[in-house]
Amino acid sequence: MTQSPSADAWRGKRVLVTGHTGFKGAWLSLWLRRLGAEVTGISLPPPTRPSLFELAKLDTLIDSHVCDVRDASAVASAVRAARPDVVFHLAAQALVRESYRTPLDTFATNVQGTANLLEAVRDVPSVRAVVVITTDKVYQNAEAGFPFRETDPLGGHDPYSASKAACELVVESYRKSFLAERGVAVATARAGNVIGGGDWAADRLIPDAIRAFGAGQTLLVRRPAAVRPWQHVLEPLAGYLLLAERLEREPVLAGAFNFGPPTDEAATVREVVELARRCYGRGEVSWGEGDAGPHEAGWLALEVMRARSVLGVRARWNLAEGVARTVEWYRKCDQGLDARVLCETDLDAFDERVSRTSA
């Protein structure tokens, strides 16, 4: 049976979200408030203009604080003040190409920032569960054509991937050395490529496509044959919420979980662009040869059986529906519709799909 996050589990719960001004963090914060949680967010200011955080006016819904996770004392103060029951750690430098430009900042944010957060959690007795969001790119990828399992070796060619693999080691060390004995369950969530309305980051496929199509410009696609486990943003967020619920009840589940579409539904960049262009109704594309820019993996897919069997996580929207809903979100936002209402509409549809699937 497909599981859905429970309002009974979240109503009145104190939740800390790091990176709440980012794309995934804003969606997660909105969903938590919808479930009745009391949400505190710590993050740098929104990384893009426009931003979902600002358009959805999330500062009116949650207790929002500017905080750099690289600042250990600031993080410690924020965690103490929030007294959270559950922590979701999403604050990160999350772009592969940016990591080549700013490797030291990437490692400082993704590795030291995670250590700062977990060190702060050690001193706050209210915390029962922590979910640290990493990436599908933490694995040592020889591109052999096999989906990665949670037990596969970690690695990382580019600074982003390497920093997230190192983040996984930091989490494991803190879990074994300090947090498990205190009854704090810490898990990592390794999610595939996400799409959805409200992402305006550079060097992301759908935002780049929407910008190009809307401006009547040609979309330049560097690696059309690259394969990724694409999914709508609500898919992994549902998994994070379900994981946190279970960690509180069953701390023995602490560990790593993959979140993505069924393995055989990983798709090429070209397929995603063609779906987006069809939904948008127009758009010119220039297809690259796959050799431009620094190294990026050509093939990546995840084995998601652990999340499916342990947490009851199953994909609700296939790739075509996820792309269609994403494009429609941007189209309506451009027409002046309220961003928060658009997110709530997608959440309603997502919940409705669960009800139909479980019936």
Image (cartoon, rainbow, N blue to C red):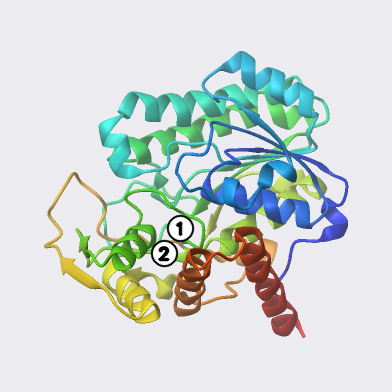
Q: Is residue 309 above or below residue 242?
A: below
Compare residues 255 and 208 and report the one nearer the observer: 208
Residue 306 appears at what percent x and percent y?
59, 61
The answer to whether mark 1 and mark 2 are in CB contact below 8 A is yes
| Rendering quarter of residue 39 | top right
Q: What residue is rendered at 60% in x and 48% in y?
A: 26
Residue type, numbered disc 1: Gly
Residue type, numbered disc 2: Pro
Total residue callouts: 2
Q: Label 1: how many residues lie within 10 Å, few (<14), some (14-19) or many (20+)? A: many
Lower position in the chain sequence, tag 1 or tag 2? 1
Secondary structure of residue under mark 2: loop
Residue 193 appears at what percent x and percent y?
43, 58
Q: What residue is rendered at 44% in x and 32% in y?
A: 166
Q: What residue is rendered at 52% in x and 64% in y?
A: 333
Secondary structure of residue under mark 1: loop
Q: Label 2: how many residues lie within 10 Å, few (<14), some (14-19) or many (20+)? A: many
Tag 2 residue: 229
Q: What residue is rendered at 62% in x and 26% in y?
A: 117
Residue 273 appears at what percent x and percent y?
31, 71
